[in-house]
Image (cartoon, helix red, strand yellow):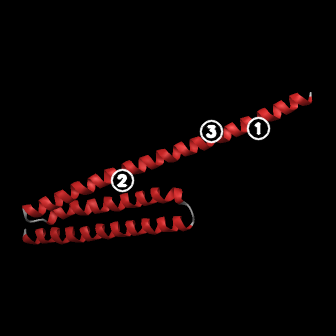
Amino acid sequence: MQILQEIIFQGGEIAVLLFELLALIMVVFAGCKGILSLFHHDEDNVALALLKGFSIGLSFLLGAEILKTIVLQEVSELLMVGGVIIMRVALSVLIHWEMKQEQKERELEEHSRKIELANQVIDHHQKKMSQQGEED
């Protein structure tokens, strides 16, 4: 029984480290991608790319915190991990909300551009029709 418990603890600790490493990689990758987007003057995609990367990284960190509950031995540690989990869930919800807002803004801007283009085409067509009417 002692050996099985030790295997679970060791496996849990390795899994926590792996999840934390994956989170670090995702956050660094998202940051680098955001910096490259800024250098390529693609500011529209920077915020969304960062938010997506941070959200994935935060999900890995949340998974790591949940796995930490396997290896905890004291109630005070469990309370601390529980508080961290609550904070990370709140951050995750906030990031997802921000991503949705960003996507809505993009869709609205795209819709406005299409309407503006349609208005320009209509104005051009009306001018052309009125010029033809004057020639007749």
Crowd around label 1: few <14 · some 14–19 · many ≥20 (10 Å)? few
Is the residue 74 above or below the residue 87 in the image? below
Q: What residue is disc 3 on?
A: 115
Real-space CA distance between mark 1 and mark 3, rounded to the nearest whole angstrom: 14 Å
Does residue 25 appear to the left or right of 104 in the view shown?
A: left
Real-space CA distance between mark 1 and mark 2, rounded to the nearest whole angstrom: 43 Å
Looking at the rendered structure, the secondary structure element under dot 2 is helix
Looking at the rendered structure, the secondary structure element under dot 3 is helix
Looking at the rendered structure, the secondary structure element under dot 1 is helix
Quarter of the image with the C terminus is: top right
Q: What residue is disc 2 on?
A: 95
Q: Quadrant of residue 61?
A: bottom left
Residues 99 and 119: in front is 119
Whole-percent x, y for residue 123 in the image = 73, 36
Whole-percent x, y for residue 105 in the image = 49, 46
Real-space CA distance between mark 2 and mark 3, rounded to the nearest whole angstrom: 30 Å
Residue at left 18%, top 72%? 10
Does residue 90 appear to the left or right of 33 in the view shown?
A: left
- Disc 2 marks which amino acid? Ile
Residues 70 and 99: in front is 99
Whole-percent x, y for residue 97 in the image = 37, 48
Mark closer to the chain start, 1 or 3: 3
Residue at left 7%, top 64%? 74
Q: What residue is disc 1 on?
A: 124
